[in-house]
Image (cartoon, grey):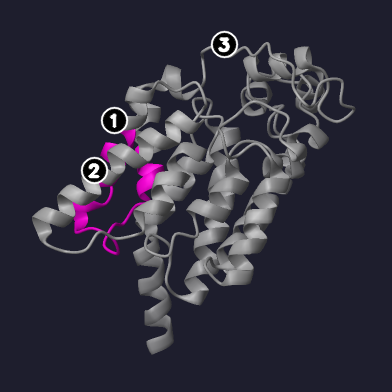
Amino acid sequence: VLPIIFVSYLVGGLWEVLFAVVRRHEINEGFLVTGMLFPLILPPTLPLWQVAVGVSFGIVIGKEIFGGVGYNILNPALTARAFLFFAYPAQISGDKVWVGTAKTAFDNNPIFGTVAENVDGVTMATPLAVAAAVEKGGDAVQAMADQGFTLFNMTMGNIPGCIGSTSVIAILLGMGFLIMTGIASWRVMLSGIVGCVAMGALFNVLPLDNAFAALPFVYHLAMGGFLFGIVFMATDPVSASATNTGKYIYGFLIGVLTVLIRVANPAYPEGAMLAILFMNVMAPLIDHFVVQGHIK
């Protein structure tokens, strides 16, 4: 993990300095956030050269060509990940077998299991991939439980996935900090969670022959990158809706689209990234109609 963070800061920082020199302005400290968020949404097995290419794309194409900080319409870290997702799909999905053999402090721990279980937990598919692969008429909950993907394990973070998005507890701690300090909008977070729950519950009652659709809505909150995305990515003040009413609409639609993409699109079992980027593009339109409504 540390080499990925180092490369992200080094390469991204070089681009920031270069554009600051060319445009003759101060280096903006906003990159300190992007440089950390980008590694947290990557698998730990990603080659370092892809980290460098991804962060370069996110900074240059996702932010600087629009004019720099405050002018970008897309979240730079998510833009970088989206580029890697479509350019190098095998590596971004964590296809490498990652094995650790050293004793850990969690060995034979009742919560974290044995070393062998921890190693297996890293080398198997992610919960979303398991749920998406269940055949029609199957039980997605049971299929996930057979792989060790229980709600408890997903809440604790003892599952494979991107570096920062596996532990619900850690994400909730970050959410509390952002809300208490007033850095991020609680309206986006709340409406996003409501949208995710609403769409998940709707799929639960619809007569669909789809095991993923029958998955209880609470699993959509704990699985994949939705919770991390709605807390740390969707709340980016530059690319999110600026009006209070718009934030409710923006967040709600992110939650709805995340579940919709997961269940209805067989190609992408994780919908959070695409949902947030799509709503980044729609945010100005939402704010436009909110302002027009106030004027009327």
Identify the mark nearer the N-term, 3 or 1. 1
Magenta-drawn stretch contains 65 = yes
Q: Is residue 213 above or below residue 291?
A: above
Secondary structure type for disc 3: loop
Is residue 260 something that shows in the picture? Answer: yes
Question: Picture quarter containing residue 67?
Answer: bottom left
Secondary structure type for disc 2: helix
**Which quarter of the image is occupied by the C terminus?**
bottom left
Residue annotated with mark 1: 53
Q: Amino acid at mark 3?
A: Val
Q: Is residue 213 above or below residue 87?
A: below
Disc on res. 97: 3
Identify the mark nearer the N-term, 3 or 2. 2
Secondary structure type for disc 1: helix
Magenta-drawn stretch contains 265 = no
Q: Please tell me which residue is depicted at 39% across the width and 55% down the height of the picture.
A: 280
Give the magenta range.
Answer: 54-80
- Residue 252 is situated, as x and y percent measured from the top left of the image, at 57, 59
Question: Picture quarter containing residue 5?
Answer: top left
Q: How many residues crowd mark 3 within 10 Å: few (<14), some (14–19), many (20+)?
A: few
Question: Picture quarter containing residue 55?
Answer: top left
- Residue 210 is situated, as x and y percent measured from the top left of the image, at 69, 28
Residue annotated with mark 2: 14
Q: Amino acid at mark 2?
A: Leu
